[in-house]
Amino acid sequence: MDEAAAGSASGEPEQQALFEWSDTAPAPAQAGAFRDSPQARRMLDVREVYAEPEALNSPRGRQIMARLPGVRVTEVAGHWRIPSLHGNDGNIARWVRVKTETLVLGVKHTLTTRPNGRSADWIAPGPSNGCAMACAYCYVPRRKGYANPITLFTNIEAITAHVRRHVRAQGPKTEPNQCDPQAWVYDIGENGDCSVDALVCDNTADLIAAFRGLPTAKASFATKFVNPDLLALDPQGRTRVRFSLMPATDARLLDIRTTPIAERIAAAADFLDAGYEVHFNLSPVVLRPGWQRDWADLLIHLDDVLPARVKEQAAAEIIMLTHNQLLHEVNLGWHPRAEDVLWQPDVQETKRSQNGALNVRYDLTTKQRSLTRMRQLLATHAAWLRVRYAF
């Protein structure tokens, strides 16, 4: 990919949907793993690795590097602040290219499971930070500066051991809640996308395998990427996949480099049949002219195409857009059209997050009115889709 690929004559950023490039012929079916396919290489074609020495020399680090022969490696003292990467404002113009071609390997030294109580009971220490996709509203890059490629944590044995200890210490879940009626739910992908991580290494597979042996708990992760390799991981009902959905009009503008919405929906039955619990994130809800009509169309499509077995076990989260001043400024450098709908000061108010960041969200009246309208749309067009959490 050359620099010119960062935009088109129409001003759109790179590709709008990973599997619908107009200038690319469909790849022939492959007998091997999806992560070795041309489609996967379009998502992640690593040319440069920044790595902590400890991560590079770990078993997982060696596994990753064995898949990247000849790739340039730069050793760094820490994965979080790499001046030439995170501190280089010239990377804004290369936002998507950096995500495609750069990988960071680190060690997660602080292993903490935090209470949540919203989408999940607990937030587990994640196996990654950052993503190869480029959703314009993503919260992860808000504190990372001018680049946000995948950082993979290679001490996966320590992460899974920590999670097992934490689950066993909780004992059985005695009271149902909005997260799950019976199992403790652990979000394992708070700061990354586990489906994309699986293109590079087996961290996602290891976590799914760990929860397969934990009958009182479930793993959970949201994704915007359909990775068929996950169908072979045999979760046995102990992992919940939450496919993130929004109207296709929004996705073409905001969900850069993701699997098209219709393909995410079409994958739901395959993942259910492979042993996953399948939920949906209606997220983020972005308020702009025509948003109610387009969400109604999406819900009608869900109702039309999903088989009964998916509907019977499905639940949804509704999440209104939250944005951020620093991310707004970064986006203006690589995808300013997104900010036409994401940055709306007339209906947004500031909010100090738990980590100290200054975010913006829809003002309380606008948000409450919009959530009420989303529930009405669900009741009208997809009454079977239970709302598990709305924020």
Image (tube, rainbow, N blue to C red):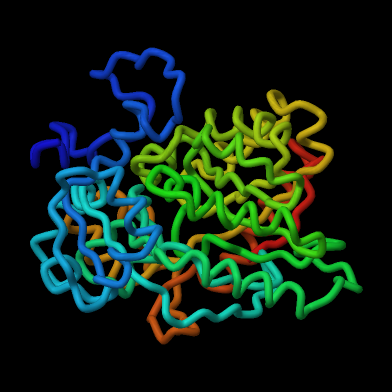
Count of all numbered marks drawn on residues in the image: 0
Q: Residue 9: x and y, percent? A: 13, 32
Q: Residue 86: x and y, percent? A: 19, 69
Q: Residue 272: x and y, percent? A: 72, 36
- Tell me: residue 15, above or below residue 318: above
* Near-viewer residue (3 or 174): 174
Query: Which residue is at a point 13% across and 53% down the rendered structure image?
Result: 72
Quadrant of the rendered structure where residue 145 is?
Answer: bottom left
Query: Which residue is at a point 16% across and 65% down the rendered structure image?
Result: 85
Quadrant of the rendered structure where residue 295 is?
Answer: top right
* Near-viewer residue (84 or 79): 79
- Tell me: residue 237, above or below residue 40: below
* Near-viewer residue (354 or 336): 354
Q: Residue 275: x and y, percent? A: 73, 39
- Tell me: residue 170, above or below residue 136: below
Q: Is residue 154 left or right of residue 97?
A: right
Query: Which residue is at a point 74% across and 36% down the rendered structure image?
Result: 381
Q: Is residue 47 left or right of residue 134?
A: left
Location of the N terminus (image quadrant): top left
- Tell me: residue 205, above or below residue 77: above
Location of the C terminus (image quadrant): bottom right
| Outermost residue toward the right in this view | 174
